[in-house]
Image (cartoon, coloured by chain):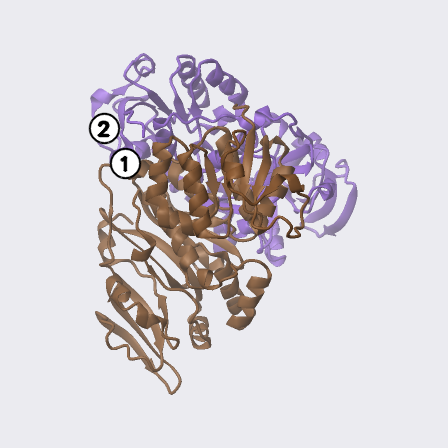
Chain colours: A purple, B brown
Amino acid sequence: MNDKKLKIGLFGLGVVGQGIWKIIARAKNAHAEIVKICVRDIDKPRGIDVTHDLLTTDGNDILNDPEINLIVEVVDNADASYRYVTEALRRGIPVVSGNKAMIARHLPELIRLQSEHNTALLYDASSCGSIPVIRNLEEYYDNDLLLEVKGILNGSTNFILSRVFDHGEDYQHALRKAQQLGFAESDPSFDVGGYDALFKLVIITVHALGVYVAPDHVFTYGIGNIGDFDIRYAREKGVKIKLVAQVVKVAEEKFTMFVMPEFVSPEKYIYSVDDEYNGVVIRGECYDRQFMFGKGAGSLPTASSILSDVMARRHDYRYEYKKMHYQTLPVYTDDVELRIYIRYRDTDISKLPFIRVREQYTSDDNKYLIGDILLKDLKHNRALLDNPDIFVANIPLFFKDRDTLPE
Amino acid sequence: MNDKKLKIGLFGLGVVGQGIWKIIARAKNAHAEIVKICVRDIDKPRGIDVTHDLLTTDGNDILNDPEINLIVEVVDNADASYRYVTEALRRGIPVVSGNKAMIARHLPELIRLQSEHNTALLYDASSCGSIPVIRNLEEYYDNDLLLEVKGILNGSTNFILSRVFDHGEDYQHALRKAQQLGFAESDPSFDVGGYDALFKLVIITVHALGVYVAPDHVFTYGIGNIGDFDIRYAREKGVKIKLVAQVVKVAEEKFTMFVMPEFVSPEKYIYSVDDEYNGVVIRGECYDRQFMFGKGAGSLPTASSILSDVMARRHDYRYEYKKMHYQTLPVYTDDVELRIYIRYRDTDISKLPFIRVREQYTSDDNKYLIGDILLKDLKHNRALLDNPDIFVANIPLFFKDRDTLPE
């Protein structure tokens, strides 16, 4: 047992930062103490009992403090997050961060900095709220038998879709409720557009398969355009629409990944992941499917996940990115066939190169088409899919190439 | 990245041992190789491709081999398991074991041996099939905010109960099917009597709360006496009967634990854990409930869990039993009130000191009583409950003392 006492410099005292303050006060055996907090506005009223001398607006007060042996960064701004985290790592100070956008965009550099300066950056909290998915992929699924990680990674869109599907609320009303409850970011497009799930998926892929794919290269489509017609359609088919992120091996040496709404049927584990919960299915060659489930949004669940990262630093834990050093790494491909549902009205979708159209429906108000299309062709036509009359959902099917893998 | 190549000596080549052989051959990046296997009978026909020179009947051929840097022990015999594992640890050889009975009975000594000889014993595979519950409790829920670990820890009884509840089969028929599928141990009382779940619970409690409670001190009641009346009763109430193991904080400094059948209502996570699956709910002060779910029985799921322990040894992972060193540890108590259902016929149950009887039913064929009773009084009368006309199930309710803990 390491008797190291953690002296923490905290960046950010918003919803999550306040949760961390409360939880660390409560965890008597954590041997951790917050000794300085960098905030934007010292005099802003906060609902917690923090003395003024702990607060500073100057990040250097934390970075230069030799007493501080761990930095916890939960700033609501990716640029500030990047500056604080990289500077701390360059000085050899270990960091726990919850900023998925920053991490997903800069992961290769952040991995290099950890190695060059022999320090650690932990970010389990960034990836699935309270579910320890990164740590498990890194440590427990530490082998090349992993076939798929698929799940609901964004609590606020899942909350919205649950209100719509289970409670018959309309979309706008559900979105407002999510924001009131603090589940949605102030800019809802981050959640609703699928970017939050995308950033988490990019991070997960590094720890699942050892490969970094930059966020810009991943097809991402959110739930912003979902309409009553789509909801009715899904209900009639006995499925729910969920925003699903997935990374899937499609052949021994190839994988694909994307974020998009999906028709989820009741026999799937993620069907019953409702409200602000997250759920992740990890599929492997030998253990079939494993399912992890927990709160994916909110101050205390996120803060308790940060606490787990903090505690890991008591025994000097760091991610080793072992899979990145495998001799053969699978290669990312978007040359895979998907089956999609596309609902439209006025947009001419004839330039979408469907390999095969399977169903087509036309009425005065709505049209939809179900067909098979390559993911890369969806990417090439990504802008078209933002037209407000269009909504796209994935109809999961086994990828053709995957026949070569054991089921 | 550690480039250590693992040279494994394997004890046991039964169902799980053969799964390990197959999986290690398949995991190309594992850098692990089985170099010697101790079996009881060299000439027994086996469905796998193992050359005869690898096999030995003398455990010393493994223990004395200087090339071997990891022992994997999956012997179907607790005494032999104890001898091999303790001898290996005494020689400083790290061990991965799947023998829950042996580990649960000898854990304090096994912890001491690891420390004295500066080596490691890993046993995630022993505790929940393919669900990484020990590692998560040890590493991720490494703080004192944990309130409860509760779950279905035994795949074969769960398989049997699923056949009974979901498929209307009778108990004996379901038991035989479980045995045919290799889900049940050759001696069914190990599973059916709740002992398998008990041993897992004892191990989990060490990693959840830092306290070892010997198996003999824990109230354990299995499903062997379940009858048609009980199944009908549960169905009428809209609940399932599941064999549930739980360790629960009942006050800030007190916890209780037991294994017994429980009426599980549909809104509970474990309600939908069916067939040979295991499911564990971890409840904490801040993250509410987390749920982990996966295959709990079978050759390959168990073997892949062993592989995760094996891989952890590549980077010299060991359990640190951190929580055992906390300054204040909660104390085990059986002085807690439970609400139970007891079905009986001829047995005089009047000596069970119910605090309050809540319901009573009598017919020509069956009687049942629902009432509140102290766990310690159930323990004192444990022998009575084995009478073949009796079946007991827990009706979960909030423990009275727990009002002092945050909900």
Residue that mark 2 sits on: A50
A294 or A182, nearer to the observer: A294
At 29% from the left edge and 45% from the top edge, which residue is drawn? B211
Position in image of residue A234 (x %, y %): 61, 53
Residue B383 or A376: which is nearer the viewer?
Answer: B383
Chain for disc number 2: A
Q: Give the foreground label among 1 and 2.
A: 1
Query: Which numbered marker is on residue B251?
Result: none
Residue B268 in view (yes/no)? no
Give the image quarter of residue B397.
bottom left
Badge 1 amino acid: His
User: In this rendering, is residue A95 above or below A270?
Assistant: above
| Disc 1 secondary structure class | helix
Left or right: B241, with A351 as reference point? left
User: What residue did someone put label 1 on?
Assistant: B325
Residue under the point 42% across and 61% down? B243
